Image (cartoon, grey):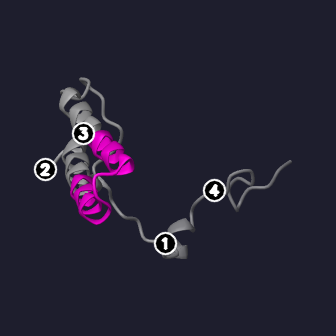
Amino acid sequence: MGSSSDGVREAVATLQQAVERLRHEYGDTLGVRRLHSDVQRFEADLAELGDPQPGHRPGPAPEELEEIPDDDYDASMWSDAEQEGFGAPDRHAP
């Protein structure tokens, strides 16, 4: 299983390729040099991240999520249930 940083590294590599295509199209302009510098900074910052903090987990991984359908439940499932605020169907308030 890949980590979040792997996905970010891949995105930065894709961005680097896009900036190189811009360099071929626009030449070595100030804007292209600044974009190239920004992407290099992203790469350096990713390299300095290190490992995630112990116990830090922002949420479940997509493969850990369970999809619950929006279909209506079978009405018989609720036949013996009490309705909140109303109590059981066979009892009445005094």
Q: Circle 4 sits on which residue?
A: 82
Q: Furthest residue to the left?
A: 1
Q: Amino acid at mark 3?
A: Gln
Q: Is residue 82 magenta?
A: no
Q: Amino acid at mark 4?
A: Glu
Mark 2–mark 3 contact, CB under 8 Å? Answer: no
Magenta-colored segment: predominant secondary structure: helix
5 relative position to 70: left or right = left
Disc 3: which residue: 40
Secondary structure beneath dot 3 equals helix
Tell me where residue 34 appears, x and y as whole percent: 35, 43
At x 22% / y 57%, what residue is drawn?
20
Is 87 left or right of 46, judged from the image as shown? right
Q: Disc 4 and disc 1: Cα gap in Å?
A: 23 Å
Query: Relative to 87, does residue 46 appear above or below in the rendering?
Result: above
Tell me where the magenta segment starts and ends, as one range: 15-39
Instruction: Identify the residue position indicated by label 2 in the image.
Output: 1
The spot of residue 46 in percent (x, y) is 23, 35
**Which one is in front in this view, the residue at disc 3 or the one at disc 4?**
3
Which is nearer the N-term, disc 3 or disc 4? Answer: 3
Question: Looking at the image, which residue is at 32% across and 55% down?
Answer: 65
Q: Amino acid at mark 1?
A: Asp
Q: Position of residue 94 (x, y in %)?
A: 86, 48
Crowd around label 4: few <14 · some 14–19 · many ≥20 (10 Å): few
